[in-house]
Amino acid sequence: MGAVEPVVDEENGEKETKIRDVEKGEMDSQQRGFQGQPTPAPAPAESGGENFHMSRMQRLSATNPLRLVMNAGTRVASPSPYNAPPPAQHRPHRSFPNPFHHRHPPAPAPSQQRHAPVPEPAPVPAPSQHHPSPAPSQTRSTPAVTPQPSVITLNSRSYTNKFSLFLFLIHMIGAIGLVCFLVFKGIQGLLEAGEAQRKEKRLLKFFLPQVEAVSLLSITLAFTWQKAMRLWPTFMVHFILWGSFIFTLAAGILLICFQRPSTDGVGVVLIIFAIGNGLYSCWVTPRIKFCTKILIKSLEPVPKFGDLNRPTYLTLAAGFLWMSMWILAVIGAINFYFPPLVIIGLVFSMAWVTEVMRNVVNLTVSRVIGLYYLRGMQSSTQFCFQRALSVNLGSACLGSLFVPTIEVLRVVARALNLLEGEDEFMFCCAHCGLKIMDSVFKRGNGWAYVQIATYGKSFVKASQDTWELFQKREMETIVDSDMTSAICFLTGVCSGSICVIVIGAWTFTVYPNFTATLSLLSAYVGYLLTRIAMALPHACVSSYYVCYAENPDNRLFDKTIQDRLNSMKTDRDVIVPTPRSVPSRFAR
């Protein structure tokens, strides 16, 4: 800024200070008549006039109009670029007119500088108030507007995970076409005389009735477990943990008692699984109390929605019809090329379809319960079911492929890390695998279905956001040790074991050659159909955890989770150790 000159007028005993700004062209008469001498002497002060000090000139800005005139008259070197003021576009807005907007006449030639008078800058009226020069760091540009966060809608109509939805639709078209073709081949084999006709008649007589019976028995058991879980959650948690152990062990012993090589192999596998199941039940005993509290609290909103179980009824009815067509296709595969490969393909196709059905129910219940917790809304179950079958179906298809695989690999990695040995290389690989699976788990987990159903996010995005919420609330340990998924899995194991006992005994009585095959198929069908019905309590618990992490101050939540966190922090609660990190001796 230019120099300012205070002028004091004394009249009637009052002092008035006037500020003159040299940069704006406010100069007294002696300055206007000044000719460019090398060393001008200060003008004498006059009474009532304006006093000007040449020392003030040294503090003028290098771009000041008066300074430019003085430089032209005295041939002073141009100022250093390091001392130049910032560009005009970075200067803050000032309330007075900018003098640089006025064009000044060019300086006279050197030969005329000593004789031609210096042109006067146009006088600019003084401002009403002087503003001090701002700091160099301040800029004249308009400050950037902070972007507002995008509004999250609860009724997004955009389809999620379109590529996985496309793959599932292509798979369903191919599966329906293959099933219809194999049913046609089965009918064709029945009409043609020969060995294929005899095989198919034997299958229709001793194989098909058991499969239809096991489907109906599985659906009955599924609704029985779900109803009992809602009425007596405390009893059912203990019953499922130890009932799955007892029923699986009984099924294995029964198959061994048949004394056939095929049944002996299946029986040994069931017994080994039962032993592992019993060890797990003993290991998680300290978690049962907290699991029961969360299950009771999360099932409280279910009676408020009378039709919440309707999607489960519809899905299981569709599953029964598809299972009937599927078993006819398995029978017809005998008359096609490579029957074992075709049957294996049908088995994997059935697993994906039933898992998608379960996740459709999961998404429906998650949206109904999630909106009840987050917004206090009484959502329409039918509308939520339609969204799960259309908008969010792609996420259900993607999660159905990856979540079971990730969970199984994560369990295997944790089991390996529970063992300690002397083989540094083997256990280093096990710890590395655990870190990889934990990283993958944060980007693809079953907790994501709540945000997929509520906000319409994609599967990976919902998984990441949900896990970040858990980390923000320091809930990773509680969520990681939750038993709800294991309880639902073991409920399917219970149904599968009961089906093995019933169908195995029946088949051994009428046709022993099919005992091992129908025992495996019974366990498979019983597990899949039961998991569909158990999606309701699983979704309720997931919604409770995720919605609590999003808004723990909601009046619908109690202090169960917070008390658990406080107990863990103060070491008053016993936590079953679960391998989640690499020991220091393997860390690099």
Image (cartoon, grey):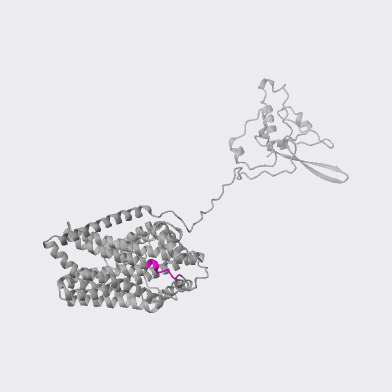
Q: Position of residue 398 (x, y in %)?
A: 35, 58
Q: Position of residue 471 (x, y in %)?
A: 45, 63
Is residue 91 highlighted in magenta?
no
Magenta span: 305-312
Name the image quarter holding residue 587: bottom left
Q: Is residue 63 left or right of residue 176?
A: right
In the foreground, 252 or 120: 252
Q: Is residue 408 left or right of residue 187?
A: right
Q: Is residue 387 left or right of residue 20?
A: left
Looking at the rendered image, the quarter that the C terminus falls into is: bottom left
Looking at the rendered image, the quarter that the N terminus falls into is: top right
Q: Position of residue 163 (x, y in %)?
A: 35, 52
Outermost residue toward the left in this view: 194
Task: Specify whether residue 419 is in view.
Answer: no
Asked if 355 appears above or below 164 in the picture, the reply is below
In the foreground, 125 or 187: 187
Instruction: Determine the residue positioned at 30% across, 75% down.
Output: 244
